[in-house]
Image (cartoon, helix red, strand yellow):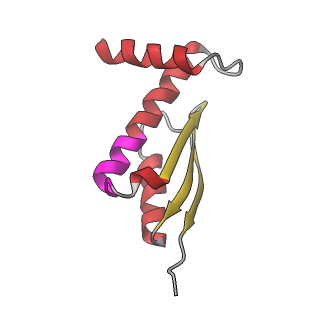
Amino acid sequence: MKALLVLTVCALLIGCRTNESPEQQVNDLEITATVKSKLASDVGVSTVPNISVNSTNGVVTLSGQVDTAATKAKAETIAQSVPKVRRVVDNLQVAGTPQ
């Protein structure tokens, strides 16, 4: 109940999205929070600040830079495993190694 209240307040602070119902906005906030939490625990806390997670109508978009192709693939798999995710758009870039 407390989590729902926090998510509702967050939805109000974000503003109205005219293409989403209030229920879908709360679902998207839950999806985003869950994806970020799973990324932190499974990929590593040091990588998470480099990954931006956005969810709209159940479509999760990942963007930013990661260190390896394996990390990129793992982040996409994690996002796909979250309940209520309809699709994942993976815009993550693998950072090149400096020479």
**Is residue 38 part of the magenta span, yes or no?**
yes
Q: Position of residue 86 (x, y in %)?
A: 56, 39
Asked if residue 84 lies left or right of residue 38, the reply is right
Predominant SS of the magenta segment: helix
Along the line of sight, which residue is nearer the eye, 57 or 61?
61
Q: Residue furthest right?
A: 18
Residue most extreme to the front: 99
Q: Image point 41% across, 34% down: which residue?
A: 33
Residue 4 drawn at (x, y percent): 37, 15
- Residue pictured at 65% horizontal, 20% vertical: 20
Quadrant of the rendering where the N terminus is positioned: top left
Q: How many marks?
A: 0
Q: Is residue 4 above or below residue 98?
A: above
Q: Which residues make up the magenta segment?
A: 35-45
Q: Is residue 58 above or below residue 90?
A: above
Where does the image place residue 97, in percent across and percent down from the top left? 50, 80
Question: Measured along the vertical axis of the image, is residue 79 above or below residue 67?
Answer: above
Residue 36 relative to residue 92: left or right:
left
Residue 74 coordinates in the image, percent (x, y)? 42, 60
| Quadrant of res 56 | top right
Name which residue lies at 71% across and 18% down: 18
What residue sits 57% from the left and 64% below the top? 93
Vertically, is 81 above or below 58? below
